[in-house]
Amino acid sequence: MIEARHLRVLRAVAATGSFSAAGRRLGCTQPAVSQQMKALEASVGTPLLVRGGREMRLTQAGEALVRHAGGILAGLTAAEEEVAAIAGLRAGRVRLVSFPSGSSALVPAALAALRAAHPGTRVSLEEAEPPASVDMLREGECDVALAFRYPGAPGVEEWDDLVVRPLLTDRLVGLVPERHPLAARSGAVGIGELAGEPWIAGCPRCRGRLVEVCEDAGFTPRIDFATDDYPAVVGLVGAGLGVAVLPQLALESVRPRHARVLTLEPAVRREVVALTLPDLAQVPAVAATLEQLGHAADR
C-alpha cells in the first residue's frame, strides 16, 4: 500500500538528488528519509532509486511513480478538504502562486475579502511566472495559480487539463521618459515609432512577446536592460535610460515617476486567469479563493 507521506518523500528526493537535501526540504533527518524510501520500495516491490557514490537517480519504476505523484497528492488534498468541509469544519488551506503584477494588483483585495468571509481559511502565497507556476500546479505544489498568456502568440500554452477562471484582459502599454518627444502624444503611438530606442524588457515571457511584436512591426528591439522587477523597469525609464512596454496591470501599484504612459498600436493584450486542477476546484476553500480573485479583477 502506497502512503502519501512516502510519495512526498520520493518527490523531494527526486527534486533534490539526495536524502540529506530532501530531509532539509521536508524538515526531517536523513535517516528518516532513508527509512521511508525503504518502506516505499518494500510496498511497491521494486527498487525506485539507484544509489551510487554521490549520485542518486530514479529507476524506471521511480520515474513512473514520481510522474503520477502530483496528481495523486492533489486528489488526496481535494478529498481531505472536501471531507473536512462536509464534516462542518470551518477551516481550509490554499497554496496560491502568482506572477508579480498579479500579486500586487489582484491578490491583496482577494485575500482580504477571503479572510473576512472565511477567517479560518489559511492562504500562503509564492511568486512564480508562467509556465513555471502552471507546472507547480500540475505537480501538486500549489492549489491555485494566477497565470497569463498571449492569445495567438507562437507556442501559446494549452490549459485543457485545468479548470480556467478568466479574470481580465490586460493591455500592454508603452512607457517613455517624461522628456521623450512622444511623451506629450495624446493619441495612440505605433510601436514602430520606438524602433530606434534602447529598450528595457520585463519578465522572460513578456520579453519574448515584445520581440515578436517589434519584429512584426519591422524591427528588432535593442534591449539594453532586462529585469523581472517592474518598479526597476519604471525607474530605469524614468532615469532616461530607455523605453519599455509593460502590462497595464503592472502599473496599478507602481507610480511611474518621471515617465509617461503611452497607448500602443497595434493593441497587444494578455489573458489573465486563475487556474486549478479539476479535483481541487471542488474544495470549498479553493472555490472561495477563485471567487474572490474574480471579484478583485472586476473592481
Image: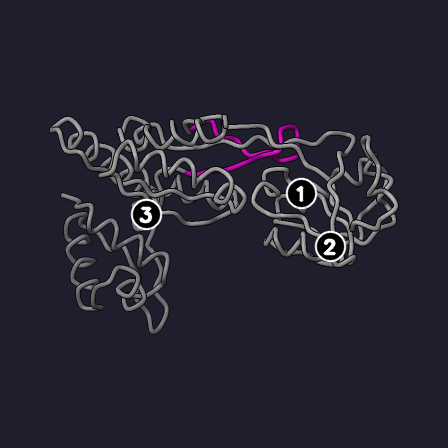
Q: Which residues are magenta?
A: 145-161
Give me the C-alpha separation between circle 3 and circle 2: 48 Å
* Nearer the observer, 81 or 131: 81
- Residue at the image position 63 percent from the left and 39 percent from the top: 247
Residue 139 image point, x, y percent = 37, 43
What secondary structure is found at the residue carrying circle 1?
strand
What secondary structure is found at the residue carrying circle 2?
helix
Quarter of the figure with residue 293 = top left
Residue under pointer 2: 238
What secondary structure is found at the residue carrying circle 3?
helix
Residue under pointer 1: 246
Disc 2 crowd rating (10 Å Cα; few below 14, some 14-19, many 20+) is: many
Is 29 situated above or below 179?
below
- Residue at the image position 84 percent from the left and 49 percent from the top: 180
Residue under pointer 3: 66
Q: Earlier in the sequence, mark 3 or mark 2?
A: 3
Report the amino acid beneath label 3: Val
Residue 233 image point, x, y percent = 66, 53
> Number of labelled discs?
3
Residue 111 image point, x, y percent = 37, 38
